[in-house]
Every structure is written in C-alpha cells, then in structure tokens.
Image (cartoon, grey):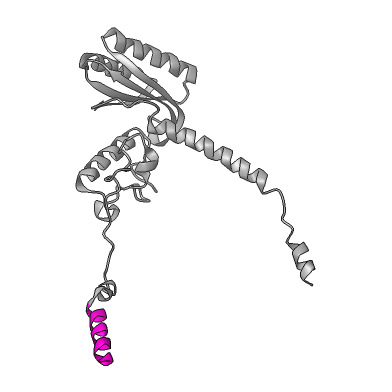
Amino acid sequence: MPFYENVFIARQDVSSAQVETLTDTLANLVTEHGGKVTKREYWGLRNLSYRIKKNRKGHYVLLNLDAPPAAVNELERNMRINEDVLRYLTVHVEALEEGPSAMMQARSRGEERERERSRRFDRDGRDGAPAEAEGGEA
Amino acid sequence: MSDDIRGGERGERGGGGRQQSRRPFFRRRKSCPFSGPHAPKIDYKDVKLLQRFVSERGKIVPSRISAVSTLKQRELAQAIKRARFLGLLPYSLR
C-alpha cells in the first residue's frame, strides 16, 4: 500500500478534546477501508500566517497513512464535508518518517531554550570582586 | 648574483596568486546548502528551515542568491508552496 502524509487544520473554536475525537473518527475511517494510521501528531493551536475562512488560529493534526487510495479518497471526502476542518493536505511520500516530525522537534527545542535562559538568569545574580585587587597595588 | 635572485623573486610575486586575490570582482564560489553529508532534508513541515529561503516580503529567494542547486530549488519551491497552503508560511507580507 502507498504511503501518505495528511495534515489538516481544525477550526480554532473547537476544543482540543473535540479535535482528538475528530482525529479518532477520521483514523477509524481509514482503518475501516483497509488502511493503517502509523503516526498521529497533534501540533497544537497554531497561529495561521493568513486568515482562512475568517480564522486566525487553527489546530494542526498530522496523520501518517499506509492506506489504499480508496481510503484516502474517503478520508478527503469526509474532511470536505466536515465544517470543523478548515483545510487539509494529503501528500504521497516514498517513505513514512519515523519519530517526531520537524514541527515537533522545533517545539521541543524551543522548550529547551526557555530552560537555558532561566538558568542563565540565576547565574548572573552574583558579582565579582575586582576592587580588592586594585587596592593591593596601591 | 644576489641582485639576480631578488629580481626573480619579485617577478614571481607579481605574476603569482597575489594578483588573483586583488581582482576587483572576486567572489567566493558558494556551494548548495542542500548537498553534502550534513545537508538538511527539505520538508514542508520544517518552517524554520524554509523561512531562511523566503524574503522579507514572503517571496521565494532566487537560487542565484541563495546558491541552492537547480534540482533542490525545485524541491524547495514545492515545499514552500505546500507550507503556504497550510498557513505555515505567508503568501505575502505587508
């Protein structure tokens, strides 16, 4: 079966729990049509670069699929019908990537930087003692 | 004798590598950022990477400026357009 990556954006005023159930139903749809969902990623509520259907933010979800084309057709049809889905993109890929995607890696790296910054702030609290050395010379 | 040797040295210096570096429009040859052993993979989900190849206005930077090879530029353009469609990158700014 061919591999696909599917990203869809859900409306901003939908709660993250509702997004979870929505992805569940969509994932079930794929498995019903003889496909497999190998990875699910929730990127969170992100700012859109421009307004899509009057929305400034959206919940991003990535699905990695190993499914027959018929299942993908059915999935896309349902996404078109569902009004909570602002947009979707399905891309055929040669191989599905293992582990977190670039988006998730960027997010975890951002958290690390936050931690580093707070550590530096703690360290800069003390003062050196250069005045003493000057006194010795005189 | 000593004069002869000095003369020879001077001649070599004039015609050697020094003059090349003094050429007015010398540019270092840039290499493609997506080729080589540690090259990053072009991926429409990697917004941070793609942003480096987009101008302040949100346009795709031409390969003659970014030094991306022709093949990789096509791949990159495709990735940027996908990211735009998903609202990860802007179509235009300002």
In the image, A96 versus A84, the foreground residue is A96
Quadrant of res B49: top left
Q: Outermost residue toward the top?
A: A32
Locate the C terminus of chain A and report the quarter of the image it occupies.
Answer: bottom right
Question: What residue is at 25 percent from the left and 38 percent from the top?
Answer: B78
Q: Position of residue A36 (x, y in %)?
A: 30, 14
Locate the N terminus of chain A and report the quarter of the image it occupies.
Answer: top left
Q: Position of residue A93 (x, y in %)?
A: 25, 27
Question: What residue is at 36 percent from the left and 39 percent from the top?
Answer: B89
Instruction: Judge from the rendering whether residue A67 lies leftward or rightward of residue A107; answer left or right.
Output: left
In the image, B49 versus B83, the foreground residue is B49
Vertical arrangement, residue B9 with respect to residue B36, above or below: below
Instruction: Judge from the rendering whether residue B12 lies leftward or rightward of residue A113; answer left or right.
Output: left
In the image, A22 versus A84, the foreground residue is A22
Vertical arrangement, residue A126 with respect to residue A13, above or below: below
Question: What residue is at 48 percent from the left and 33 percent from the top?
Answer: A108
Q: Position of residue B29 (x, y in %)?
A: 26, 59
Q: Position of residue A14 (x, y in %)?
A: 46, 21
Q: Is residue B9 magenta?
A: yes
Q: Is residue A27 magenta?
A: no
How many numbered tags mark residues here? 0
Viewer can see residue B93: yes
Viewer can see residue A55: no
Q: Outermost residue toward the front?
A: B1
Highlighted range, magenta: B1-15
